[in-house]
Structure formats: structure tokens, C-alpha cells
Amino acid sequence: MNNNNTDVLIIGAGAIGMAVAYELSRYELSVTVVDRLNDVGGDASRSNSAIIHTGFDAPPSTLESSLVVHANPMFDRLCRELDIPFRRTGAVLVAVTEEEEEEIPEILDKAHENGVFDLYYLPARKVREMEPLITPKVRCGLYIPRESIIDPFLLVIAMAEIAVKNGVEFYRECEVKNIVYNGRSFTTETTKGKVKSKIVINAAGLNTDKISNFLGIDDFKVTPRRGQFHVIDRSAELPIRHIILPVPTKISKGKLITPTIHGNWLIGPTAEDLSDKSLSNTTRNGLDEIISDVKKLIPAIDKNYVITQYAGLRPVREPGGYHIRTFKNIPGFIELSGIRSTGITSSPAVAVFTCRKLKEMGIPLKHREAVCTVSTPLPIRKGIVMFRELNNLERAELIERDPLYGRIVCRCETVTESEVVQSIKRNPGAHDLDGIKRRVRAGLGRCQGGFCGMHIPKILARELNIPLNRVTKKGGGSFFLNGETKRFE
């Protein structure tokens, strides 16, 4: 890319940036997305609790509340269009102390202020009927039926695939170094060249303050809040059907346990305010804190079933709150900042709201007839057929059509070579081990890559036509191999 011209430049390929690109691909506009990372998904969108919220506990009368509440019903249709898994498991919020019990009426009132009326009070007996593993100390609870679970990786990837199919250009490992506005248009300088555009949309998450600073906007700051998680193996066989929520604190929603769309469980997160935006490591204290706190809700949690841990960084804006801003002195610049842990949920509504802002700025949005129909706003995406989800007859028929489906490369998740190859060849496709992991789950099982880690690098090298020692875990300099063992020694 060098001196590329586009109508709209989106900075950031997380859930918000890709939802905006997905929405804009309905219109007769040229759209380009750049991201400093090696894949779509951003920072927070890759490492979160994978929950679609109702907005029952959002700050009332705020932009966040409005967007989250209105986005939740959009997911049933959106996930059908994108062919990604989504399940309305519902959530049970549990009060285990007298102080928490006293907060339940206030939580109900807040939910009603937010327009979320389908919350139901549960006495202790009913909570235990719904979730037998709940602590016997439970005093009461709330049932929130529309709290849901999703695969957040696939959500962002699927939106990106459709956006690119509809003409959006995507550049990875493309960091923005400066933005110059000449009164009519923008020139954005990146590590891969310059991009000239009429519109710049700042969806850079943790780095929205840095991007806005290029244009002299310095009235806010973004700092990272680290959230650590444990992943519990599906062999634990926990009979937990709902998302189990604690009574939220002023800082966070607290530490929860949730089933995942793929059959295991997540517990966490912590809420640690940091200064370093790259500090996404886990810590002993944080992980121990999760186990201790979640045991107060589910005493049966056994850390011996934990197969891995991870941490994500959520953007904390000061002053706080969602901000979707335009600027009279910089017409054409839109800043999407302060979109925190509810960003996955709000993303489709944020995208529509952003398009409304473009209309207010006088940008004509003419629908592209080729991608808009009455039955579905965009072409229906067909996801990669997952071998593990088929019966034996279906598997045999699939192998006959595509022999690569007959080669298992990830035993824990029953992932085949064909699925890995497809994840690489799609656009935007996987360029590294983490990209494959997010698309087809190879490496996310019990052995955490102990088996597939020997096979997938070879497939990546072959399909990308690169030397084996240039295969990376997550782009940049994260090379998977250093050299031959004896020579290295």
C-alpha cells in the first residue's frame, strides 16, 4: 500500500472497527481498514468473557446503555447471517451476603431505567433449583434470560470476511504514525505507506487517545484495565447451564463463571488498572484471586481442571463513558472512544450509530443493490464446516469430497487439515498460529497445542509459501522456531 485513496479509513480492526466496516460495506463507498496487529480482533475483542449483555446494569441514560440495550436483539439475526454460534443461555445473578441482597432492588430499578424489563426475582430455593452447584449461602438472585454467549473471535472474523467480500480493503501490521488534515481531506501515514481519505474513523480501542492526539485532540486519556481468566476443561462436567454473575461492584461486573459456546467454562475476570498498554500477562495473585472469589459462588470449582489462562486489556477512558464524537474544526473525523467491556455487545449498534453520524456530516450513503436484499441485508456467510460437529456418515461423505478432512491435526478439538487450510485461504485469512486457533480452535483444547503444534506450522509454511522458521505465533517477531535442536544447542 502506498498513496492509497479511499473514501473512509477505519483505524482499528477490533469488534467496533470491523462492525463499522461491515455496516459501511452496504453502501457505495470505498472503505479501508488498517490495524497494527497481525489479524482482526484488536486487543479487548480477543480476550474477554464472550458474553452478549442485555445492558441491565449499564449506567442509565447514557449512550452506552442505549447502544447495548438496542444491540442485544440484533444478534439473533446477525449470527444467522454470519453463520456463527450464538446461544441465549440466560444468566443468574447471585446474592450471597446480606449487603448484596439489599442491592437487588436497586439493580432491578436500574434495569428498568435502562428499558430491560425481563428480569425476574428468584428466592434462594429457586436459584438452587436452576443451578444446583450454587453455594448454600445464597440468599436470593435475579434471572436475566437474554444474557447470551458467543464466539467473539468468529464474530469479528465473520464480519471482516463479509466486509472484504463486499470490497473493503484490510491491511494488517499497519501501524498509524501520523494524520494530517489539510482542511478538505486526511493523509494518514502508516508503516505501509500513506492513505488519503475523506473520512477517518478512530476505532483504535486502547490507542484511541494516541490517534486523536495526531489531530490535536487531547481532552481525554485511555488507560488499560487488565482482566485475567481461567479456562476450565469440558472434562470437568460441571452441570452449569447459565452464566453465573456476582452482584457487580462500582469498578467491574465482578468475577463470573460462564459456559462457553464450545462446551467448556470461563471464570474471571480480574479488574486491574495499569499504565502499560502492552502488559497483558497473567499473574499468580490475579489467578488465585479468581479461584477464591468464584468459589464463593460455586464451591465445587476445581482448579485442577484449568487447562489455560489468559488476560485481556479493556480500554478505560477518562473522562469516562462511551463517546462517538465529531468535530466542527475537523469535519470528517469520527472518534469512537471509551467503548469498554460491553464493546462486543454494542458493536452492531455502534456501527449503525456511526453511519448516522456520517449522514449528519453530509456524507451520502447510497445502498449497494448487489449486497442488499429484502430477505437479508448482506450475503449470508457460510462458515467452515467443523468435523467435530458431524456424525460418522456425514464425516465419511465429507472426506470423500475433500480428503484433507480425513487428517486430524488437533486431537483435543478434532480439527482437520482441511479446516486449517480453509482458515488460511479465507480473506482475511490466518497468517499465524493464533489466527488459526481463533478460527477453528486448533490449540485451544486440553493439551494446548502439544499435538497440533507439531503439524500446523508446516501447514502454514506450505500454504503461505514461507520458510518454516518464519512462521509466527501472533505476527511481528513471535517466531515459533529458532532452528534445529542440535544446532541451537
Image (cartoon, rainbow, N blue to C red):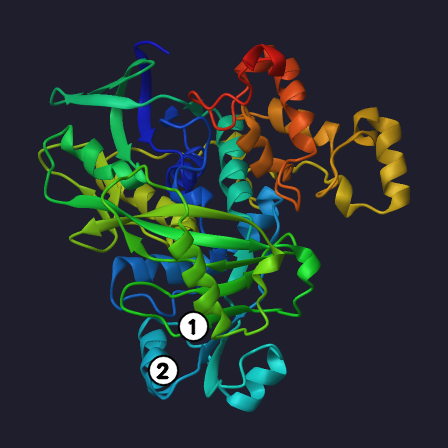
**Helix, strand or loop at disc 1?**
strand
What count of labels does the image hold?
2
Do the CB atoms of the residues marked 1 and 2 lie less than 8 Å apart?
A: yes
**SS of the residue under disc 2:** helix
The x, y position of residue 310, in whole percent, is 47, 46
Task: Tell me: 179 left or right of 54.
Answer: left
Residue neighbourhood size for the residue with mark 1, other residues' Cα within 10 Å, grouped as few (<14), some (14–19), many (≥20): many
Say above or below: 65 vs 349. below
Figure quadrant of the N terminus: top left
Of residues 303 and 247, which is closer to you in this image? 303
Q: Seen in the image, is 384 located left or right of residue 313?
A: right
Residue placed under numbered mark 1 in the picture: 246
Q: Position of residue 294 (x, y in %)?
A: 48, 68
Q: CA distance from mark 1 to mark 2?
A: 9 Å
According to the picture, the residue beneath numbered tag 2 turns out to be 100
- Residue 259 falls in image quadrant: bottom right
Q: Residue at x 32, y 66 (%)?
A: 58
**Front in this rendered view, residue 424 or 113:** 424
Q: Residue at x 77, y 40 (%)?
A: 387
> What residue type is disc 1 on?
Pro
Q: Is residue 59 above or below residue 350?
A: below
**Viewed as shown, does residue 309 lie left or right of 410?**
left
Q: Residue 244: x and y, percent?
A: 51, 70
Name the kind of residue labelled 2 in the image: Glu
Above or below, comparing residue 67 to residue 356 in the picture = below
Q: Is residue 466 visible?
A: no
Residue at the (61%, 42%) spot, across then down? 444
